[in-house]
Amino acid sequence: MIRFLTISLLLTLLLTSCGTYKYPTSSGIRSIAPKEVNTYYADTAQAYVYRTRLTAFQKKINGNLVVKSISPDTHRLALLSDFGQTLFDISVFSDTYVVHYAMADLNKKKVVKEVASLFRLLTSRRFATEALIFPTQQYFPVYVANGDYYTYEERNLVEIRHVKGSKERFSVRFSDVQDALPQQIDIKHKRYPLSLSLQLDSAQSEL
Amino acid sequence: MKNWVKLMLLAVFLLPLAGWAQMKAMSTQEVQAFQQALKQLATVKTLSADFVQYKHLSFMKKPVESSGKLFIVQPDRLSWSYTAPFNYKMVFKDNKIFINDEGKKRSMDLGNSKQFEKISKLVTNSMQGGRYDEKEFAVAYFKDGGNDVVRLTPKLSEAKKYIQEIVLRFSSTNHQVQEVKLVEPSKDYTRFVLKNTQINKQIHDSVFDY
């Protein structure tokens, strides 16, 4: 199963296209004073355990994603199988990462890089200097940081769209936000059938 | 994944060997006495136990915990189920793995049935006196307080990718395995604590429904 997953993840890395991404319904972009976005995982006193269901090319793996804030800009994440096996253990910084462990079958440079990119998007605090303009005012604010799109609803970050070239690569959807912490996170790859569903396990988390 | 599952199952069911904490190597006489004690145990035809699984990560203060139940009926039936904090059941029978994931059911053929046979054989041998294949593991015996401890270090490169060592701790009173510790190459480890172990008690067929 792991080998299949490896191959599947490698396939997802192929053929990225160039161009410019246009956020649906937006009519332009404007500069703003720097705004901090994605502060869910900034508290270094806390650690979070999310029950995880990973589906990749019709293969399913259940387990836990453990998220620990080392500093406001450094997070350590470990993806575990139900049997306790560590699949990935990676520290992500604002622009780089360190692999502490990757299971042998998954320890491929491109796979690890993609996983680190996803972990970074999920946890990293960013500073947006641009926001989208919409033709009417009925849209929720969308901020742009590092080329990614951060959507807010009622002061809570609810979605990040990660864009590469002209295409949306994957999206992270935060929901059921309680005490400034999302209880549910859904991550979807936009090009391949790859998704993660995360449910906060408060009892196991260090809150 | 498969290799991990195999190693984990192997470790959990290697009943006669194991340990940790301030350990002292057993003398030759102590090893012989330990092995002799295991050989005198009743032949294991069925086994049931509760387990608690603790996953320890170096950067976390407390382990990630789960618990469940284990049933074995020799020679070829095995049920491994988590009951908290989630429900997930795996049943090995009829050369297949049956999975019930929170009510969603699926089954898979055992890709390499010879591997499963190999595990079954190792488990059986272990239950009946602790004969380990020293081509696959370097075996070391220790005393830790009142407990006997066996450390298995994989010799084969394929296994070494996933497991640095398996440590088994035995009860000083009934010589049954109390704990199994699987140490990964990163030094993070998973500890399985077995409780309410029952040997050769009737296990109803419904345990292997899924």
Image (cartoon, rainbow, N blue to C red):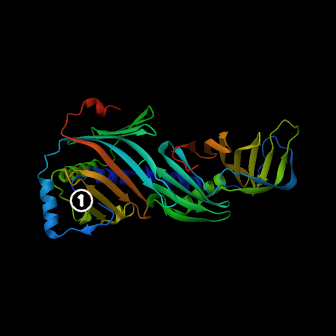
Q: Residue furthest front?
A: B145
Note whether B154 is above or below A145 in the view shown.
below
Taking the image as drawn, is residue B3 in sight? yes
Note whether A171 is above or below B57 in the view shown.
above
Q: Nearer the viewer, residue A25 or B68?
A: B68
Residue B66 in percent (x, y) is at 42, 45
- Looking at the rendered structure, the secondary structure element under dot 1 is loop
Residue at image location 70% in from the left, 44% down from the top: A159
Q: Nearer the viewer, residue B141 or A80?
A: B141
Left or right: where B173 falls relative to A14: left
Residue A141 in percent (x, y) is at 81, 43
Q: State the quadrant of the C terminus of chain B.
A: top left
Give the amino acid type for the residue marked by disc 1 in the picture. Answer: Gly
Give neighbour class at mark 1: few <14, some 14-19, many 20+ (Cα, 10 Å). Answer: few
Left or right: where A4 falls relative to B73: right
Left or right: where B60 falls relative to A28: left
Taking the image as drawn, is residue A54 in sight? no
Residue A123 in percent (x, y) is at 65, 54
Q: Nearer the viewer, residue A155 or A190?
A: A155
Residue at image location 42% in from the left, 64% down from the top: B187
The number of numbered discs placed on residues in the rendered structure image is 1
Left or right: where A176 falls relative to B40: right
Q: What subunit carries mark 1? A: B
Q: Nearer the viewer, residue A8 or B163?
A: B163
Residue A126 in percent (x, y) is at 73, 57
Q: Which residue is mark 1?
A: B146
Residue at image location 15% in from the left, 54% down from the top: B38
Answer with the quarter of the image where residue B82 lies: top left
